[in-house]
Amino acid sequence: MSTTLPAQQNYTVPGLERGLRLLFEFNRHEQTLTAPELAKRLDLPRTTTFRLLATLESMGFVQRVEGGHAYKLGMAILRLGFEYLASLELTELGTPILERVRDETGLSCNLAIQDEHSVVVISKVAAPTPFVSTVHVGTRLPLHATLLGRVLLSDMKPADLLALYPDDTLPKFSERTPSNTAMLYELIRQDAERGYGYDEGYFEPEVGSAAVAVRNKHGHIVAVLGVTIPVSYLRSGKLDTPQLVNTVRSAATELSQLLGYNSNAPSAM
């Protein structure tokens, strides 16, 4: 007995489709939109648009701004993204390694990737210390102004940096933030020559960091693994910087190898 499946369009849910189309209207250039604007773009009655917005607002996918007359994406969108990130091979393989680094050093350990001009933390293992970090999974930090970002950029040449920052002017986040790509290149060149990044007070005056790049099977930098060093640890006089760097380097190397990286193979250009 043969069974004929209904046409695929018979399985679609129009209300769900409209809600998803509505969410796709928000982007980095248009972060807030009003209900009338959305109704016009989607060619929907205003009452339908308001009902869609009310439903999405109740679930946390949008929230009201500007006195309630406009909307922006809500935290539920981010949570969906974080759940997806947590399912990636990188985080699945990396989390046990981060936990081991945390246990060996007593420091919080992060795994982060580049997203255009930002560093995005995709995995974090916190140390049981009084130090309260503002960095969590999903946190976005400026690429050029953080040690994690510098390490992610450490394969770049001056022309690459100019392509990434065509204005050649970098916003300041601390006294030590480079103000142009030439200054940034000098910092990442030093990190690349060492094979790791280490700095104190680069992004936040009371925090230090040590970080090493994670590479894929093609030899490309795909992530950075780093530890956060609170000022109390720095001032204790007990910080063995070479040992700490070796621990972070070994962890990043192990994760790279799990991703198929072979340091003896010729790098892909």
Image (spheres, grey):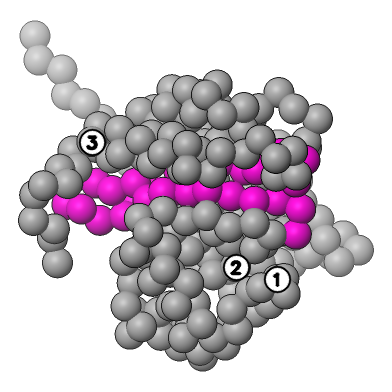
Front-most of 154 and 114?
154
Is residue 102 visible to us here?
yes
SS assignment at label 2: loop
Indicate the amino acid at tag 1: Phe
- Tell me which residue sits at (62%, 39%) in the image: 239
Q: CA distance from mark 1 to mark 3?
A: 34 Å
Indicate the amino acid at tag 3: Gln
Relative image position of residue 23 (x, y in whole percent): 58, 54
- Tell me which residue sits at (54%, 59%) in the image: 147
Residue bearing the label numbered 3: 257
Q: Is residue 153 left or right of residue 59?
A: left
Taking the view exactly as shown, the residue that stands out farthest to the right is 67
Relative image position of residue 206 (x, y in whole percent): 76, 53
Q: Is residue 26 left or right of residue 175?
A: left
Badge 3: residue crowd in 10 Å (few <14, some 14–19, many ≥20): some
Membership of 246 in magenta stretch = no
Taking the view exactly as shown, the residue that stands out farthest to the top is 1
Please, is residue 57 above or below residue 251 in the view?
A: below
Residue bearing the label numbered 1: 173
- Tell me which residue sits at (32%, 78%) in the image: 157
Segment tinted magenta in the rendering: 205-233
Q: CA distance from mark 2 to mark 3?
A: 28 Å
Membership of 210 in magenta stretch = yes
- Tell me which residue sits at (71%, 23%) in the image: 128
Indicate the amino acid at tag 2: Ala
Whether pointer 1 and pointer 2 mark residues with C-beta atoms closer than 8 Å, the reply is yes
Q: Is residue 100 left or right of residue 230?
A: left
Residue bearing the label numbered 2: 145
